[in-house]
Image (cartoon, rainbow, N blue to C red):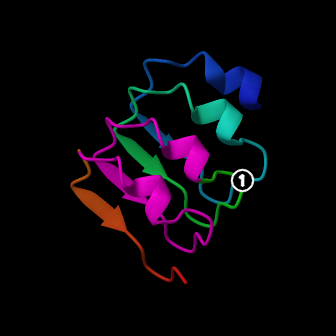
């Protein structure tokens, strides 16, 4: 699966990209219906990729050292945030 393959899945609500080395910001930035996103051990998705995902209620950033305060500050619907092992 590549960015092109995932881009059109606009009704997707849950996505697990843990240990992903293919999908980038380009692939997920239009998935505005996502409510759950797992970015454990993922260095391909940055602040720019999650910025517009305002429907997220659950975000897993375990072992993710790429996403910063800047990326999550607009995610006002978050009810669950995992930052375990995050430096």
Look at the image and tell me in which quarter the N terminus lies.
top right
Residue visible at 55% across and 64% down? Answer: 40
Residue 41 vertical placement versus 22 (above, below): below
Q: Looking at the picture, tell me which residue is in the foreground, 28 or 19.
A: 28
Asked where in the image residue 52 lies, by quadrant, the reply is top left
The x and y percentages for residue 14 are 42, 37
Is residue 48 a member of the stretch shown in magenta? yes
Task: Left or right? Give the position of 78 relative to 44.
Answer: left
Task: Left or right? Give the position of 22 relative to 82.
Answer: right
Residue visible at 40% across and 33% down? Answer: 34
The main secondary structure of the magenta stretch is: loop
Secondary structure, mark 1, is: loop
Q: Which residues are magenta?
A: 47-76
Task: Left or right? Give the position of 79 relative to 72.
Answer: left
Residue visible at 64% across and 26% down? Answer: 6
The x and y percentages for residue 5 are 71, 22
The x and y percentages for residue 67 are 55, 62
Residue 14 vertical placement versus 9 (above, below): below
Query: Circle 1 sits on which residue?
Result: 44
Residue visible at 67% across and 32% down? Answer: 27
């Amino acid at each position: 699966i590549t960015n092109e393959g995932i881009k059109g899945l606009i009704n997707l609500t849950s996505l697990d990209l843990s240990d992903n080395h293919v999908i980038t910001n380009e692939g997920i930035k239009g998935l505005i219906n996502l409510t759950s996103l797992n970015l454990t051990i993922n260095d391909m998705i940055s602040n720019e990729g999650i910025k517009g995902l305002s429907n997220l209620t659950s975000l897993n950033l375990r072992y993710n050292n790429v996403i910063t305060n800047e990326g999550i500050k607009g995610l006002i619907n978050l009810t669950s945030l995992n930052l375990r092992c995050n430096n």
